[in-house]
Amino acid sequence: MSTREKLVTEAALLLDDGGDAAVTLRAVAQAVGVSHNAPYRHFKDRSALLAAIAERDFRMLAAVFDQARAGDTPPIERLKVALDTFIRYGRDYPARYHLLFSDPDVGTTGGTLEAAALEAFMAFSSLVEDAQGTQALPAIATRELAGLIYATAHGLISLQAGGRMREKKGLSTAEQSMALLLTLLQNVR
């Protein structure tokens, strides 16, 4: 593993353990065991390091979606697996999830980060398209349907992370709510 990769990995772990404030170039350098100036050889500043975490995790999500798509179950089941994995990522790595989907600095970075985010969404869209191809989901514009499902998953992940999922509101878990949405979509003709 290169020094750059080690820095990104340790920064992600610091983010997981202590949130955004825990990620400093000095703390990352210390965690990797390099000089406090070493991270500057790889990253312009802290924002660039955070963008590298986001880019890596977007690429990981794209790979997860591609892996789900390669399964041998019906396409709608593959989509459910991908959504469950996505929801679990949001639950298990809330600070990273926030970085990817709620940090305004990351959202305006562009370049390879934007390409990685689009790659993840396109891989997700392919799962939706496959389910549409078997008529398990309605035959409407794939990008819009994928965007709606993706945005709904984001909303549910945020509600769950904020402790706002309530049985009284008809929301027990993000996974169950997404399964309900997909069931409803399967019945739209």
Image (spheres, rainbow, N blue to C red):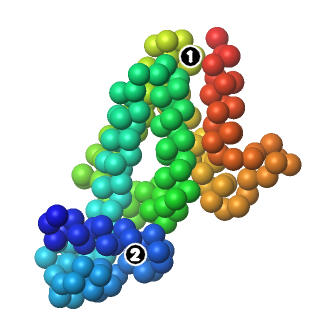
Residue farthest along the right direction in this orientation: 168
Find numbered disc 1 in the image and state the secondary structure of the residue it sits on: loop
Quadrant the C terminus occupies: top right
Residue 7: x and y in percent read: 25, 72
| Cβ atoms under marks 2 and 1 closer than 8 Å | no
Q: Nearer the viewer, residue 119 or 5?
A: 5
Q: Is residue 155 left or right of residue 139?
A: right
Quadrant the N terminus occupies: bottom left
Residue 136 numbered mark, or none? 1
Q: Quadrant of residue 158?
A: bottom right
Q: Amino acid at mark 1?
A: Ala
Asked if residue 1 is positioned above or below residue 89 in the image, the reply reads below
Instruction: Give how far apart the Cα atoms at labels 2 and 1 are.
Output: 41 Å
Residue identified by numbered label 2? 14
Q: Is residue 36 left or right of residue 83?
A: left
Asked if residue 16 is positioned above or below residue 178 in the image, the reply reads below
Asked if residue 141 is positioned above or below residue 113 in the image, the reply reads above
Report the residue at 33% width, 72% height from top: 11
Q: Amino acid at mark 2?
A: Leu
Q: Nearer the viewer, residue 116 or 79?
A: 79
Q: Quadrant of residue 163?
A: bottom right
Would residue 102 be seen by someone viewing this image from the given angle? no
Q: Nearer the viewer, residue 161 or 44?
A: 161
Residue 62: x and y in percent read: 35, 41
Residue 80: x and y in percent read: 54, 32
Residue 22: x and y in percent read: 42, 80
Q: Which of the marked residues, 2 or 1, is nearer the chain's N terminus?
A: 2
Report the residue at 31% width, 48% height from top: 59
Callout 2 environment at 10 Å: few (<14), some (14 to 19), or many (20+)?
many
